[in-house]
Image (spheres, rainbow, N blue to C red):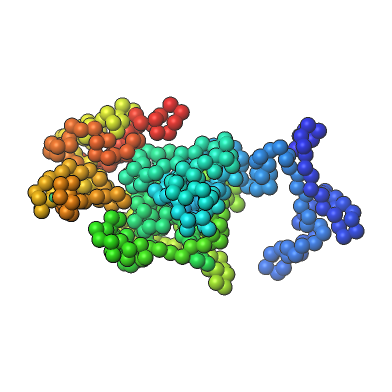
């Protein structure tokens, strides 16, 4: 505090039992006893009152109380949060309170009545509105200086990988195994750790997965999880849809969400400092690969060290990304992208293939009436609709996993025609090599400031 006269300075002073002010020049830790193991006895005594001063006009005076975190780093931070449900609400709310400068988040769902008892940002009048839209309004209200980017998009197909590449911290609070695997693959491709959380009725867990060097989410998957992962997103019959919903439904409470949301926000700030500082304070050391598990019945918190599983497929790092400033999703064709790969990999154009990374439905064929319809959508998209436009029977999808120069139907069309998002990063294979190429021409439009 430098200018106490001009600011509305707030000073907390501690008094002893007789009403005498406890001077603040005492070492707060003097008089504390150590036991034989060297631990301090922190039983509260009159010497341990901490004198706290802060400027009540300063919104982020909080950083004087959380001395390990730096306001400038948090204000410049770029954080992505996948999911804006009960837990997402808590995490996003904490980021707004802490003054995170740039917050990107995504979710598909609309608000229903059952969300109101679990989600701090939602009100009864919001029922029927998109979660991300309402969350953005409330967060903006909390901190008008934040840059907020709410997205109704799937992390795997709808958001360019270049977005994640530009983030300092990746967080996921999604509840599906499939989306977690998708996020794990994105983080691995870019060589980044990511934070994941899950909540139950009383218990919760927060994990920092570390595909670049430690255990990843997929290292811990068992067969039951793999089975759940492969359940279809858009099951064709109603009883199956209901059964799947029942299987994936988890009891969650606002209490578990609040606790794990707080832990996740704290770990996210640590990760942010880890990324931004050459030598972060040792108190902020990131426990990559550690899972915090809170068992709430007979309460305990433990840090579980997960180990990488040999041969796990969740660690595929794409290497350095080649930025191509003249490429955009809407103007660059599949052929131009493949040609770029051929040039970079120094192979013939017909040797290059673009790995899509998921099953992309490109056509549906109806056996009932013989209708063939172009239909471009990832097979695991939520709104996949395989009904025949002519007779409404279910049609058979034809899909692609890779594109090559021989795919005459698509080769001269812009990448956006195939549903690829702006600022996407593509992995191109050719000869013995492969290379990651980004549609960097979309950067200004997607990231803003251009
Ligand atoms: Zn793994
Ligand atoms: Zn038909």
Residue occupying the point 59% across, 37% down: 72
In depth, the one of 93 and 323 nearer the eye is 93
Give the image location of residue 403, x and y in percent.
19, 41
x%, y% of residue 326? 31, 26
- Is residue 267 rendered to the left or right of residue 82? right
**Which is nearer the eye, 347 or 393?**
393
Say which residue appears at 43% left-offset and 38% top-offset: 166
The quadrant the N terminus occupies is top right
Q: Nearer the viewer, residue 342 or 325?
A: 325
Q: Residue furthest bottom?
A: 298
Q: Quadrant of the C terminus?
A: top left
- Residue 346: x percent and y percent? 21, 34
Q: Is residue 279 above or below residue 178?
A: above
- For the question of whether residue 264 can be seen, the reply is no
Q: Is residue 122 above or below residue 414?
A: below
How far from the left and from the top, in percent, is residue 244?
Answer: 33, 63
| Image-based side of 294 in relation to 389, left or right | right
Q: Between 436 and 77, which is closer to the camera in this rendering?
A: 77
Quarter occupied by residue 413: top left
Residue 238 location, quadrant: bottom left
């Amino acid at each position: 505090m430098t200018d106490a006269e001009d600011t509305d300075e707030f000073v907390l002073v501690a008094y002893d039992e007789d009403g005498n002010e406890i001077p603040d020049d005492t070492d707060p830790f003097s008089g504390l006893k150590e036991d034989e193991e060297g631990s301090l006895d922190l039983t509260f005594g009159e010497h341990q009152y901490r004198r706290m001063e802060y400027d009540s006009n300063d919104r982020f005076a909080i950083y004087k109380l959380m001395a390990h975190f730096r306001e400038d780093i948090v204000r410049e931070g770029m954080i992505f949060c996948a999911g804006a449900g009960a837990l997402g609400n808590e995490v996003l709310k904490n980021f707004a309170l802490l003054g995170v400068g740039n917050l990107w988040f995504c979710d598909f769902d609309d608000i229903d009545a059952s969300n109101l008892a679990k989600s701090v940002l939602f009100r009864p009048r919001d029922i029927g509105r998109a979660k991300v839209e309402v969350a953005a309004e409330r967060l903006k209200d909390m901190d008008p200086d934040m840059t907020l980017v709410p997205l109704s998009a799937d992390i795997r197909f709808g958001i360019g990988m270049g977005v994640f590449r530009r983030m300092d911290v990746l967080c996921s609070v999604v509840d599906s195994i499939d989306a977690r695997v998708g996020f794990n693959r994105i983080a691995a491709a870019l060589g980044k750790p990511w934070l994941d959380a899950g909540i139950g009725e009383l218990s919760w867990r927060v994990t920092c997965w570390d595909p670049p060097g430690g255990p990843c989410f997929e290292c811990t998957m068992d067969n039951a999880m793999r089975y759940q992962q492969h359940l279809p997103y858009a099951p064709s019959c109603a009883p199956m849809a209901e059964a799947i919903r029942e299987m994936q439904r988890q009891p969650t409470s606002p209490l578990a969400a609040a606790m794990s949301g707080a832990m996740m926000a704290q770990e996210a700030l640590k990760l942010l400092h880890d990324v931004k500082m050459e030598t972060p304070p040792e108190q902020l050391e990131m426990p990559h690969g550690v899972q915090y598990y809170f068992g709430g019945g007979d309460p305990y918190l433990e840090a579980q060290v997960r180990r990488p599983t040999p041969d796990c497929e969740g660690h595929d790092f794409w290497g350095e990304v080649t930025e191509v400033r003249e490429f955009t999703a809407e103007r660059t064709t599949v052929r131009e992208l493949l040609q770029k790969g051929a040039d970079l990999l120094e192979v013939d154009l017909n040797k290059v293939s673009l790995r899509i990374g998921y099953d992309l439905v490109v056509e549906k064929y109806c056996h009932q009436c013989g209708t063939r319809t172009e239909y471009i959508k990832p097979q695991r998209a939520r709104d996949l609709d395989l009904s025949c436009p002519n007779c409404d029977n279910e049609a058979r999808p034809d899909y692609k996993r890779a594109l090559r120069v021989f795919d005459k139907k698509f080769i001269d069309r812009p990448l956006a025609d195939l549903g690829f998002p702006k600022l996407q990063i593509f992995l191109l294979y050719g000869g013995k090599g492969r290379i990651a190429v980004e549609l960097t021409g979309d950067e200004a439009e997607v990231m803003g400031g251009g």
